[in-house]
Amino acid sequence: MDEQTTGPRRPQHTIGFGGPEHATPAELRAELPDDLRMEFEEEYQAALNEANANGNLQALADMLPLWQGELARRRSPDWPEMEETIRRLNAGLPVDTVPADRTQWGDPG
């Protein structure tokens, strides 16, 4: 097996726990709103069941970072504004925009 080949003993993903970007399942349960908590719990239990059934943590490695990212966004001080923008976009309503040259990624020159 060469260095580029992924096998059962060569990880494709790292499952991160701890810190602001890698909430634990307990933190996710404690901080997600009820509707999302239920959805997380269903996905988490399905991933754990798959891991128990076949010894493969891939489903857990795939689903957990998505939920950790969701909680990291919700922990952000900008979350209320982001949530309102998402709500407006989903409703087909106009949203405020910023010219690219006024963003941190824009090239002012």
Image: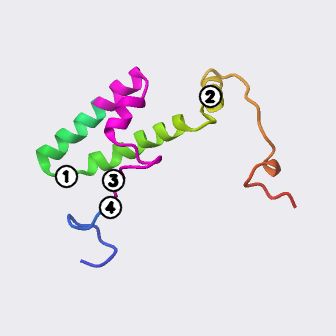
Residue 1 in the image: above or below residue 31? below
Rendered image: mark on residue 15 = 3
Q: Crowding near pointer 2: few (<14 within 10 Å), some, many (20+)?
A: few
Residue at coordinates 82% horizontally, 51% vertically from top-left?
101
Residue at coordinates 64% horizontally, 27% vertically from top-left?
89
State the residue position of label 2: 80
Q: Could you say where residue 57 lies in the image, as x and y percent from the top left? A: 23, 51
State which region is magenta: 12-41
At label 1, the amino acid type is Asn
Badge 2 or badge 1: first in the primary sequence:
1
Q: For the residues marked 3 and 1, what is the alpha-carbon distance in whole angstroms?
A: 13 Å
Q: For the residues marked 3 and 2, what is the alpha-carbon distance in whole angstroms?
A: 28 Å
Residue at coordinates 32% horizontally, 39% vertically from top-left?
25
At label 2, the amino acid type is Pro
Q: For the residues marked 1 and 4, what is the alpha-carbon distance in whole angstroms?
A: 12 Å
Q: Could you say where residue 23 lies in the image, as x and y percent from the top left? A: 40, 43
Q: Secondary structure at mark 4?
A: loop
Q: Secondary structure at mark 1?
A: loop
State the residue position of label 1: 56
User: Is 107 situated left or right of 34 in this image?
Assistant: right
Rendered image: mark on residue 12 = 4
Quadrant hosting residue 84: top right
